[in-house]
Image (tube, helix red, strand yellow):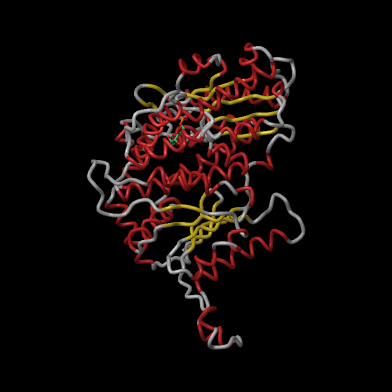
Amino acid sequence: MTAEACGLYLDYSKNLITDDTLTLLVDLAHDRNLSQRITAMFAGAHINVSEDRPALHVALRMPAGTPLMVDGVDVVVAVHEVLDRMAGFAGQIRSGAWLGHSGQPIRNVVNIGIGGSDLGPVMAHEALRHYSHPDLTMRFVSNVDATDLVEATADLDAAETLFIVASKTFTTTETMTNAASARAWLVDALGDTAAVSRHFVAVSTATERVAAFGIDPANMFGFWDWVGGRYSMDSAIGLSTMIAVGPDHFADLLAGFHAMDEHFRTAPLHHNLPVLMGLLAVWYRNFFGAQTMGVMPYDHYLSRFPAYLQQLTMESNGKHVTLAGQRVDHDTGAVYWGEPGTNGQHSFFQLIHQGTTLIPVDLIGFARSLNPVGSHHDLLTANLFAQAQALAFGRTLDEVINAGVDPAMAPHRVMDGNRPSNVVLADALTPFQLGTLVALYEHSVFTQAAIWDIDAFDQWGVELGKALAATIANDLMATTDPDATHDSSTNALIARYRRTSPS
Ligand code: G6Q
């Protein structure tokens, strides 16, 4: 029960399965037409049914010269045109050739975006720090809480700061509010509105809105409506990543994504890493009622990987109707969460080992550290292997008593075992390997969605809160007390806030 592809070795032997289980799960995948769905995704079919468009993130990492026609346009040509422009711009920032309004080179890059326009870039920035330009400071602002922007810019010199406004729609309230305040901060510091053109670039699909904001469309890097936000870190949304690590490393990252795409597209389901991981997720969710899945990277550079995965998995598969709009009759997406090992072991692992809830975990490690110091890495990896072993095999009452523990106290130390885990092992955290890892989870999510017959590429559940917030914001900012048009609880909260808020 191991499988290997694209430099990732998957040990799935410590799962609650037999060979028969696996055969049955693969049969289920066939029943659900997984292979046809994969083909449809790669062909640019409108698999995002509720938004009637393709989900074609795999085109973002196709090598130049691989034609892929969507609605009469070769999207791979378009992808590489943008990548080339990004490389040119990133090169100018990295070399110091791009000068700010006062003639100084850029030393600070602040990405303003949220959700899919933030979590991937943040995760990649942390993951690839080892490869990052040593003289560039990268910051990320997402929250509409001004504290985020204020703290991110507090120690920055505006004359040396570039803002990337990353927003697919260029309408997102948080991002537009932060971008407007960042512009005010810059203009205030440099004393000239003309400074904006040297200090703001945009990543978006909305050229007119970018221009209306005051950013020259020549300084805009585009992408397409067939790229979902949470699948966009390898599009122009990755501009901050490319500036940090350079175009060559970004190309390696894309090559890693593409290698896993090809594996997913072509490998038999039995040996297909994303399919195996997706089917195991379905197995625990639907047959064991597991509500959560832990992902624990044993690499500190991957500290934001679980947060990134939370959006990828939960926004994709947290759905309650089928593709045809019928209410599902089975559970769908699990809650994903995690922390880097070994830190998690000293906080919540207790519950995974001895709690009353089944929590399957993925443990991700690397054979080689990017920061080899003494025995740190062997200790780190020993802990990863030990956790998988302890979860699987536990410790019986007899073993505890035989070890000399007072029989009355022995039950506290018993560990049932049979707690499932996957171990994913690679040689080292390179840009290529990061690409393979992200694509592994993207396609595992897709596999789960295919089994569950749901749309993994929409996110209608986030819309109501946005609309209500817009109405409530008007009430909070009104100069005279607004009519009490909400439910009684919300009316009271608004009234109380207005009594004490200085605004
Ligand atoms: C991701 C979602 C969502 C989106 C943000 C930001 O799949 O669509 O997280 O990325 O709401 O949207 P904009 O990029 O349009 O600002």
**Nearer to the camera, 226 or 322:** 322
Q: Indicate whether 23 appears above or below 260.
A: below
**Nearer to the camera, 156 or 477:** 477
**Nearer to the camera, 111 or 125:** 111
The residue depicted at 58 percent of the width and 42 percent of the height is: 432
The residue depicted at 64 percent of the width and 65 percent of the height is: 382
Question: Splitting the image into four quadrants, where does ligand 1 fall?
Answer: top left
Percent x, y for residue 228?
42, 34
Numbered marks: total: 0
Direction from residue 425 to residue 76 in the image, left or right: left
Q: Indicate whether 22 appears above or below 442.
A: below
The residue depicted at 77 percent of the width and 59 percent of the height is: 374
Q: Please, which residue is most extreme toward the right here? A: 374
Percent x, y for residue 353?
51, 69
Quadrant of the rendered image containing residue 459: top left
The residue depicted at 50 percent of the width and 14 percent of the height is: 211
**Nearer to the camera, 416 or 40:** 416
